[in-house]
């Protein structure tokens, strides 16, 4: 039996390339509403959107087919992705160095507001301790909600559009495609993705 069949049997569905429970529990729904309302109020009192650092990982395949965006549930086919590795202390340290280089004002004055999808099986105690030690505020995120992750609803959607129907010959072709994709995107593209968060929280 494939991983796909196990996940389907367990009641999971794929939304925006993330496996989530097909039916959210009452607690999931209440948490989603409560966290979204809290974030909206906090942002109205003291806007923190420009302090957000977010990120995620996406698997890029050499052969890309066009598929449904919301739920990928064709019976009998193998899954399109493998579970993503989690957030680690090393990744946090690499990110810290990149922020120092590219957004030093966040380290020196404003402070980092870190946003990631915490529903995935990651974030060890050591990683959480490291985030606290760095003084980063970790943005609350309702579990099983990829529609509230800018990487999923904005960046990866655009990236997937650029890949649809393309066949990449090898690793070098994939790297070239990704370099061009990111080089062609103006700063405003990334800002727009973050600035859509309040609109997402209201839904």
Image: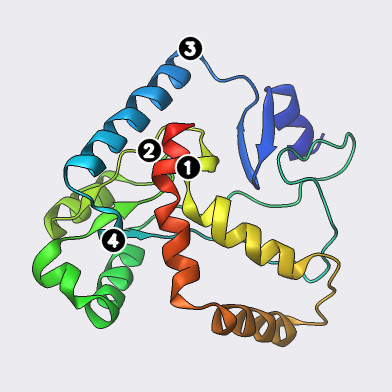
How far apart are the alpha carbons under marks 2 and 4? 17 Å
Q: Earlier in the sequence, mark 2 or mark 4?
A: 4
Q: Is residue 65 above or below residue 141?
A: below
Residue pointed to by mark 3: 26
How far apart are the alpha carbons under marks 4 and 3? 32 Å
Q: Residues within 10 Å of mark 4 (few under 14, many from 20)?
A: few
- The residue furthest left is 109
Residue pointed to by mark 1: 148
How far apart are the alpha carbons under marks 1 and 3? 18 Å
Q: Residues within 10 Å of mark 3 (few under 14, many from 20)?
A: few
Residue in the image at 69% along x and 81% along y: 177
Indicate the quadrant containing the N terminus: top left, top right, bottom left or bottom right.
top right
- Which numbered mark, 2 or 4, is in the foreground of this view? 4
Any mark on residue 50, and which?
Answer: 4
Residue in the image at 32% along x and 72% along y: 94
- Which numbered mark, 4 or 1, is in the foreground of this view? 4
Quarter location, residue 19: top right
Q: Are marks 1 and 2 in contact (CB under 8 Å)?
A: yes
Q: Nearer the viewer, residue 126 or 72?
A: 72
Residue pointed to by mark 2: 141
Mark 1, secondary structure of its residue: helix
How far apart are the alpha carbons under marks 1 and 2? 8 Å
Q: Earlier in the sequence, mark 4 or mark 1?
A: 4
Q: Earlier in the sequence, mark 4 or mark 3?
A: 3
How far apart are the alpha carbons under marks 4 and 1? 16 Å
Q: Earlier in the sequence, mark 2 or mark 3?
A: 3
Give coordinates of residue 98: x percent, y percent: 31, 77
- Which numbered mark, 4 or 3, is in the foreground of this view? 4
């Amino acid at each position: 039996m494939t991983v796909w069949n196990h996940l389907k049997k367990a009641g999971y569905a794929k939304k925006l390339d993330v496996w989530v429970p097909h039916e959210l529990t009452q607690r999931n729904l209440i948490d989603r509403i409560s966290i979204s309302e809290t974030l909206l109020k906090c942002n109205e009192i003291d806007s923190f959107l420009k302090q957000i650092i977010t990120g995620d990982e996406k698997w890029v395949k050499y052969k890309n087919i066009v598929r449904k965006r919301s739920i990928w549930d064709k019976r009998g086919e193998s899954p399109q992705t493998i579970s993503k590795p989690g957030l680690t202390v090393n990744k946090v340290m690499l990110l810290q160095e990149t922020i120092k280089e590219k957004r030093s004002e966040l380290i020196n004055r404003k402070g980092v507001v870190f946003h990631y999808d915490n529903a995935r099986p990651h974030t060890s105690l050591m990683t959480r301790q490291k985030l606290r030690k760095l003084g980063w505020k970790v943005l609350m995120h309702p579990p099983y909600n990829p529609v509230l992750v800018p990487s999923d609803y904005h960046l990866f959607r655009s990236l997937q559009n650029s890949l649809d129907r393309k066949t990449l010959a090898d690793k070098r072709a994939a790297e070239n495609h990704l370099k061009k994709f990111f080089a062609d995107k103006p700063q405003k593209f990334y800002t727009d993705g973050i600035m859509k968060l309040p609109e997402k929280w209201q839904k």
